[in-house]
Image: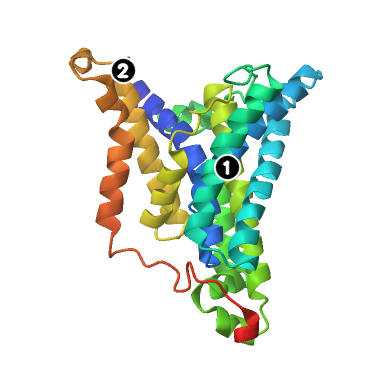
Amino acid sequence: MDVLTLLGQMLNTTLVFSTALIFAALGGIFSERSGVVNIGLEGLMMFGAFAAAVGGYYAQDAGYTDLAPWIGLLCAMAVGMLGSLIHAVASITFKADQTISGTVINFLAAGSTLYLVKLLFEGAGETPLIDGFSVTPIPWLSQIPVLGTGIFSSYPTTYLAIILVIVVYFLLFKTPFGLRLRSVGEHPSAADTLGVNVNRMRYIGVLLSGMLAGMGGATITLTTTGTFAHNTISGQGFIAIAAMIFGKWNPLGAFGAAVFFGFSQAIRNYVQMFGWSQNIPQEFIYMIPYVLTVIVLVSAVGRSSAPSALGQSYDPSKR
């Protein structure tokens, strides 16, 4: 294998691992820019991965094989939003501690999805295999050396994630909606004085967060594993939170951080190709992405400035 081919394949693998993180990190940005901490990204990704596997399976079983991945993705978006609605009601309407509420979402997702898998599939520990998305090369562009293999020969979800980075950046920083969303996360009382419905904007932010995190979970099911089990997500939601923080709650920064973490997972796979890696316990190799996550978070302490009102509930009657 020549160097250019290897570089192209590594770039492609990096983007495959990055895609789920990009979706989830963008979701976290919507929630936290509105002032609501969302520790529950892990659980919301789990809901999405489960819904994509089940929705895709039943669509495939009904004969909609070509549409099954898209139906699974839509199911993940819907279930992710429903899961985030629980977090929104608890933390915004009832003003529960947002960190605790998000943690509850994680536990709820872990327990309920495993229970439903066993209930739906006669006690099996995972869903049946489904046909997910296929690699879709872009004509002409896929012929470019390195970049053609690395970027333009990817899954549809990867293209969608990259497009969404640009869309979300524009939405947050170039539109009145984005200004209102950011204002309720920075100074909710001032936003309220100017006529912005703070709690409604926060609901929108959290629901968008759930939808995007659900898409992130679905991406793993529909491109990598082809099935859902209790370990399908394996901490990807927490890595997405790290990407969001390291990216300073900015879609472009979060994209760069997600690609970095995706690269760390790709390196883990390629390290195993070399003979000397046989002398290293596999557990250490699989630790690479998580160790890098901790290092990045430690290095980001004091350098990232969160929205001013993040984690603070708001009561309009006490304005």
Q: Secondary structure at mark 1?
A: helix
Q: Label 1 is placed on what type of residue? A: Leu
Residue 236 screen position, x and y as percent? 45, 39
- Mark 2 or mark 1: which comes first in sequence? 2
Residue 131 screen position, x and y as percent? 65, 19
Q: Which residue occupies the foreground of this view, 43 or 258?
A: 43
Q: Label 2 is placed on what type of residue? A: Asp
Q: Which residue occupies the foreground of this view, 117 or 204?
A: 117
104 lies above or below 195: above
For the point 75% across and 23% down, the residue is: 58
The residue where tag 2 is placed is: 2
For the point 52% across and 42% down, the residue is: 107
199 lies above or below 31: below
Residue 261 screen position, x and y as percent? 37, 40
Q: Quadrant of the N terminus?
A: top left
For the point 58% across and 49% down, the residue is: 164
Q: Which of the 4 quarters of the picture holds residue 266?
A: top left
The residue where tag 1 is placed is: 108
Count of marks, rendered view: 2
Q: Which residue occupies the foreground of this view, 240 or 164?
A: 240
